[in-house]
Amino acid sequence: MSHDAASGDRRGPDTASVPGPDPAPGAADAGHGSAPIVRAQGLTKTHHGEGAPVHAVRGVDLTVRPGEFVAVTGPSGAGKSTLLHLIGGLQRPDSGKLWLDGQRVDEYREARWAVLRRRSIGVVFQFFNLVSNLTVADNVELPALLAGASPKAARESRAELLAELGLEGREKSMPGELSGGEQQRVALARALVNHPALLLADEPAGSLDSKGTREVLRLLSRFHQRGQTILMVTHDARMASAADRVISFFDGRIADDAQLGGGHRGPAGGVSGVLELKE
Ligand SMILES: Nc1ncnc2c1ncn2[C@@H]1O[C@H](COP(=O)(O)OP(=O)(O)OP(=O)(O)O)[C@@H](O)[C@H]1O
Ligand SMILES: [Mg+2]
């Protein structure tokens, strides 16, 4: 498959407000404003490990609209990470359909997913996943370079983000020389350097103390207020309360889907008030 023909042909590198040229059919929510960033229909995934098969995700329907900050909570083993991995193309569904920005992606092959992830999806995990033998600066610039940015543009984006995330002066540090909170901020910078339409975060503060958790939360909220779409898995009720919508996941299914703060969708919906209480 040629490198580039894959997915980006309909959009520029900055995908934050792509209108979705090929809207998903069938629709409980058709005509409900802007086209969804994520639309899943009957998404299913069974893990076949050592013992009996585990039905981790059992037919999930989900729509996430541009600018939403959605938290997915639920007990350990409920299937939250599996769901996030399906949406980011890190695992393939057994059945069901998935559209990202209006494009049907569930049948994409790995090469095509890789291109899509580079351009349009930022991912943050619980354990930073930085490249340990690259400096902070290189960790953040790498995805930009891989996505085709010029070295100068990659440097500029990196500098801007690190300043924004309070990491100025740490460019030459190695990840191992940073605190957990600092490493997680670098991971966030790396996930955001290509201005992804969608940020996926799996327990982004799971290994941090409460100060680190507060920091990550404040940063996520700030990006959300500027319009970043975020889908975040968390155990932590405090983290979830910063979102404007909370999905309770239980036994592979959505058990509840609640809008927080009374506000309807929209980048600023009630988040800052919640945050104020927490500081
Ligand atoms: N690669 C795998 N092979 C086999 N089973 C798996 C695999 N990944 C996950 N599972 C199982 O699928 C179920 C859902 O796992 P998942 O990681 O999605 O849960 P989770 O809700 O993220 O849990 P946690 O809150 O502990 O992170 C669990 O029972 C888990 O043991
Ligand atoms: Mg998990």
Image (spheres, rainbow, N blue to C red):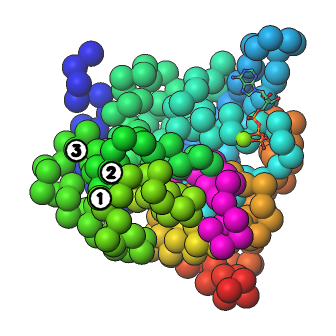
Which three-letter amino acid code belongs to the residue tagged 3?
Leu
Quick one: SS at disc 1?
Answer: loop
Q: Nearer the viewer, residue 56 or 259?
A: 56
Which residue in the structure is indicated by mark 3? 145
The part of the image, by quadrant, that contains residue 206 is bottom right
Q: Which mark is residue 172?
A: 1
- Upstream in the sequence, badge 3 or badge 2? 2
Is there CB contact under 8 Å for labels 2 and 1? yes
Gap between marks 2 and 1 measured at Cα = 5 Å
Mark 2 burial class by Cα count in 10 Å: few <14, some 14-19, many 20+:
some
Q: Nearer the viewer, residue 53 or 260?
A: 53
The part of the image, by quadrant, that contains residue 58 is top right
Q: Nearer the viewer, residue 27 or 47?
A: 47
- Upstream in the sequence, badge 3 or badge 1? 3
Q: Which mark is residue 135?
A: 2
Which portion, as a residue range, is magenta?
194-213
